[in-house]
Image: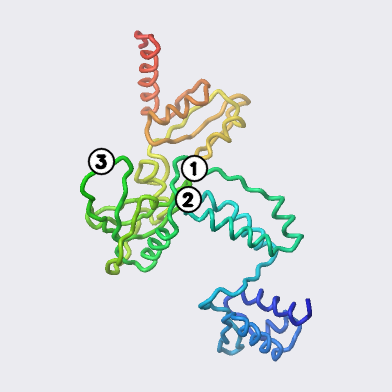
Amino acid sequence: MSAPSSRLLSLLSLLQARRDQPGDALADRLGVSPRTVRRDVDRLRELGYPVRAVMGPAGGYRLEAGADLPPLLFDDEQAVALAVALQAAATGGSGVAEGAARALATLRQVMPARLRGRLDAVRVDAVAAPGSGDVEPAVLVAVSAAVRAREVLRFDHERPGAPDGPAAAPRRVEPHAVVARAGRWYLLAWDLDRGDWRTFRLDRVRPRVPTGPRFAPREVPGGDAAAFVDARTRGGDGPGWPCTGRVLLDLPAARVAGLVPDGSVEPVGEHRCRVVLGSWSWTGLVSRLAAFDADVVVEDPPALREALARTARRLAAAGGEEHLP
């Protein structure tokens, strides 16, 4: 590569790294005069890159968005990070698996040999979340646009298994956030007809056009849209699980820690540990504890102890032991 061409790529990389770049600083980084920087900027403009001069005491340049997508330039770490992200995109539930695969093939084709070797050494075999549904890219774009514009969104909400009949009236909501959780995409919105916060799975949303009037955003309960959606999908209103208990398990902490990513494990001796774990109900928490196949001592709360006793009586009856106290 000739020196001017190499310098041009270096200039493009610097302009992509920061919004505004002083002309003198660019000249120092490239080891050339400010006049040469001006000529190189003109060459970038001829190639389709919208570089705008920035007025000010020091002067400078800014790379802005253009009408067309010109060739992009990534450094080594950016290229590898992008390629790895594209490998995992198929499990994002946004219906872009085919596009991600084609983009990855294109990116790999233009990579230098040293980067292709690094990429081929990183193979991502991701598993989609059970029951996750792909969201059409057009739906994701339409809903996200309504969130950003703060415009009332009307949409049909499909409910699998619903009986055939007259179509329900479209939902009217004030969309506040799009949240990805466990392989699914959700819309958090204020439902205008029900006067309450609602979450909707985007794979069941069919937006209608046009959107409605603009609205003033409301404060999301707790101030965190992702935490609120996480709580709703768990069956509660606050962060975390609606039912949480603290128990002693007759198992080493090392064996338990990897099985409770959403809880905490504290060693209590060599063969015992204290576990704080949650679920959507006390019965659900009992089932999680039973999966460890170990003796359990409930420390707190009494509701968990009562749920264990109820479950024990039901299981004993199912097994023919009718007289369990």
Q: Where residue 19 appears, x then y in whole percent?
A: 57, 76
Q: Nearer the viewer, residue 132 or 189?
A: 132
Q: Where residue 11 appears, x then y in whole percent?
A: 68, 78
- The number of numbered discs placed on residues in the rendered structure image is 3
- Left or right relative to 73: residue 321: left
Q: What residue type is labelled 2?
A: Gly
Q: In which quarter of the image is the N terminus?
A: bottom right
Residue 129 numbered tag? 1
Q: Nearer the viewer, residue 84 or 271?
A: 84
Q: Gap in Å between the C-alphas at discs 3 and 2?
A: 26 Å
Q: Residue at x 20, y 48 (%)?
A: 166
Q: Gap in Å between the C-alphas at discs 2 and 1?
A: 9 Å
Q: Where residue 141 appears, x then y in whole percent?
A: 42, 62
Q: What residue type is labelled 3?
A: Pro
> Is the residue 107 above or below the residue 16 in the image?
above
Q: Where residue 182 appears, x then y in whole percent?
A: 47, 46
Disc 3, SS: loop
Residue topped by disc 3: 163
Badges 2 and 1: C-beta atoms under 8 Å apart? Answer: yes
Instruction: State which tag comes first along the sequence, 2 or 1.
Output: 2
Q: Quadrant of the C terminus?
A: top left
Badges 3 and 2: C-beta atoms under 8 Å apart? Answer: no
- Left or right relative to 33: residue 192: left
Q: Nearer the viewer, mark 3 or mark 2?
A: 3
Residue topped by disc 2: 93
> Is the residue 46 above or below the residue 106 in the image?
below
